[in-house]
Image: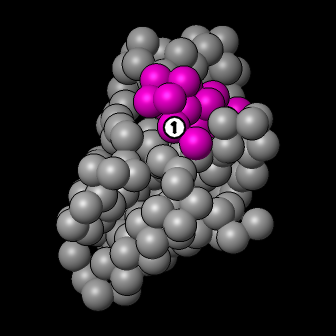
Amino acid sequence: MDTSTRMLAQQLGELLLSKNATVTCAESCTGGGIASAITDIPGSSSWFRLGVVTYANITKQSMLNVSAATLAREGAVSEDVVIEMARGALVKADADISVAVSGIAGPDGGSEAKPVGTVWFCWARADGETSTACQHFEGDRQQVRLGAVKAALTGLIDLLKK
């Protein structure tokens, strides 16, 4: 893990400990990168509940209760899907906050409407509050994925600072 990602994960852990809170993540294009960054931090078992990689739509449905209708209507890389993923992860893990990520890491799979590098995020609280963002990352597959991991961690930190 690079230094800046480790620093973000460390900061997240410190904030969660100070608030006696827990986190979970639901990942698609990052393939477990968020969970990996978090669990690289010693002691993360006291604040990290669950990381789930739902790469296929069927597992988004079965593991996180994402609606088949939402997937059919919006596609996996969409605001509505990441909201449902984040909420599903909160329920599955009984955590205080969550992040969900779905995107197109490339090199294939992009379209004019959703080019390679497009990533949707949702950060959610157990009280129902959510915030979403769509970002576009440049570079190869690994650069897109690393950028998404950093953005996910940064969003969790921002959520905790509110």
Looking at the picture, does residue 124 appear above or below residue 152?
above
Given residues 113 and 30, the one toward you in this image is 30
Looking at the picture, does residue 138 appear above or below residue 82?
below
Position in image of residue 53 (x %, y %) = 33, 37
Q: Quadrant of residue 80?
A: top right
Q: Residue at x 51, y 37 (%)?
A: 95
- Assign the magenta stretch its main secondary structure: helix
The residue labelled by disc 1 is 95
Residue 99: tell me if it is visible.
no
Given residues 35 and 27, the one toward you in this image is 35
* Image-based side of 35 in relation to 160, left or right: left
The C terminus: image quadrant? bottom right
* Image-based side of 81 in relation to 89, left or right: right
Position in image of residue 93 (x %, y %) = 44, 30
Magenta span of residues: 80-96
Looking at the picture, does residue 154 appear above or below residue 48?
below
Q: Residue at x 35, y 38 (%)?
A: 50
Q: Residue at x 38, y 71 (%)?
A: 9
> Crowding at label 1, few (<14), some or many (≥20) Cα neighbours within 10 Å?
many
Q: Residue at x 75, y 36 (%)?
A: 127
Q: Quadrant of residue 147?
A: bottom left
* Image-based side of 15 in relation to 51, left or right: right
Identity of the amino acid at label 1? Ala
The N terminus: image quadrant? bottom left
Residue 130: tell me if it is visible.
yes
Position in image of residue 51 (x %, y %) = 34, 41
Given residues 128 and 20, the one toward you in this image is 20
